[in-house]
Each structure stands twice: as structure tokens, then as C-alpha cells.
Image (spheres, rainbow, N blue to C red):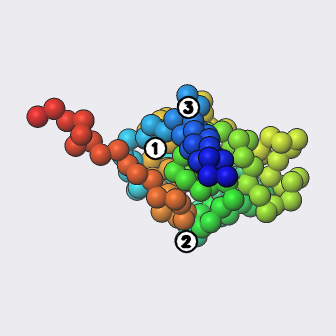
Amino acid sequence: MKYLSLYMLVLGTTILVGCESGPESSKGFSLPKGDVSNGKTVFLKYECLSCHKLKGIEQPDIMDNPELSVRLGGTSTVVKTYADLVTSIINPSHKIARGYPHSMVQIDGVSKMKVYNDVMTVTELVDVVTFLQPYYELVPHSKTDYRYYKYE
Ligand code: HEC
């Protein structure tokens, strides 16, 4: 029995560590520092509010998609970490937001969200993520401490 629990512990740890550091893991993922106010400009520029609601932000002069309204921020079923937030913008179909009628948010497993990958610059992506991040209750993201990388 004693050996069995030890075996389970070793096995469990191996599985956990394996997921954390395997080639497919998000470990090591870190975007550069973004600019919140530029992020808001990006958010308005791409008219994200035509399909979304974000607390305190209005953009009356855009075409609002009447049958599509997905709330951004707060607690989300798919956006739990910083990496999830980035992923939900560059790969919207990866995990489709839950709590909405299927026909509202997806067609055959493909998100109705517009894909911006060929028009949005990486700087714009970093900034819009920096702008949106405080609206979400995310699992804290440990930012890279660049002091360790500096050569004195
Ligand atoms: C044409 C409509 C449309 C536009 C425009 C759009 N989205 Fe979306 N977005 C969606 C839909 C539908 C979902 C829910 C399905 C999914 O998870 O992909 C979604 C989901 C998201 C999510 C995850 C939601 C959550 O909290 O669970 C984020 C973040 C997001 N969008 C950001 C953006 C940003 C930033 C822009 C502008 C650059 C944008 N979206 C523009 C339709 C749109």
C-alpha cells in the first residue's frame, strides 16, 4: 500500500511536469510590455464592440451586430489566464466561449469572431491584450523578471 501511494505520487508528478514543460506547453510564453491607452485605441479601431460588450466602454458610431453580443471581462469559462486571453484573440475557435446559444457564437465549431491575424500588428495585439487584461479575473501571470537577463 505504502509503495502504491509512492508510485502514484511519482506517476502524478511525472504527468504534471510532463504537461508543464513539454514542447506543446505554454511555458516560456511571454509577450513584451504593452500600452493600455494604445490598447483601447486598437480595441476601438477594430470595432470589437460590434460583437462585444465591455463594461464602461461605448462606441455608438459603429455597426452593432444585433444578434451577437459576447461579454468581455469578469470571469470567463475560456479565458482563465493571460495565455488564454491572447489565444482567444488569435485563435478564437480554440475554445468557444460557453453560456451562449451555439448558433449565436459559432458555426460548426468555428467561432463567429473575426480573425485579425493578417491585419493586426503584433504590437497592436500586445496592447489590446494589456488593455483587456485588467477587466478579467485571471490567474496571476508571473511576468519574466528581466533583471536575471541583464549583463552588468
Ligand atoms: C464578428 C464578431 C466579432 C468581432 C468583430 C470580435 N469578436 Fe471577439 N468573439 C466573438 C464571438 C462570437 C466570441 C465567442 C466565441 C469564441 O469564444 O470564439 C468571441 C470571443 C472573444 C473573446 C473570449 C471571450 C471570453 O471572455 O470568454 C475575446 C477575448 C474576444 N472575443 C476579443 C475580441 C477582440 C479584442 C476583438 C477586436 C479586435 C473582437 N473580439 C472582435 C465575436 C467577435
Could you give the CA–CA distance between mark 1 and mark 3, rounded to whole angstroms? 25 Å
- Residue 145's label in the rendered image is none
Residue that extends furthest to the left in the rendered view of this protein? 152
Judging by the rendered image, the residue that carries numbered circle 2 is: 56
Q: Is residue 36 left or right of residue 60?
A: left
Q: Is mark 1 within 8 Å of ligand 1?
A: no
Residue 85: percent from left, percent from top: 57, 50
Between label 2 and label 3, give the one nearer the viewer: 3
Q: Nearer the viewer, residue 66 or 79?
A: 79
Judging by the rendered image, the residue that carries numbered circle 3 is: 22
Q: Are marks 2 and 1 in contact (CB under 8 Å)?
A: no
Provide the secondary structure element on which disc 1 rests: helix
Judging by the rendered image, the residue that carries numbered circle 1 is: 126
Quadrant of the frame with the C terminus: top left
Residue occupying image coordinates x 16% and y 32%:
151
Residue 121 seen by the camera: yes
Q: Amino acid at mark 2?
A: Gly
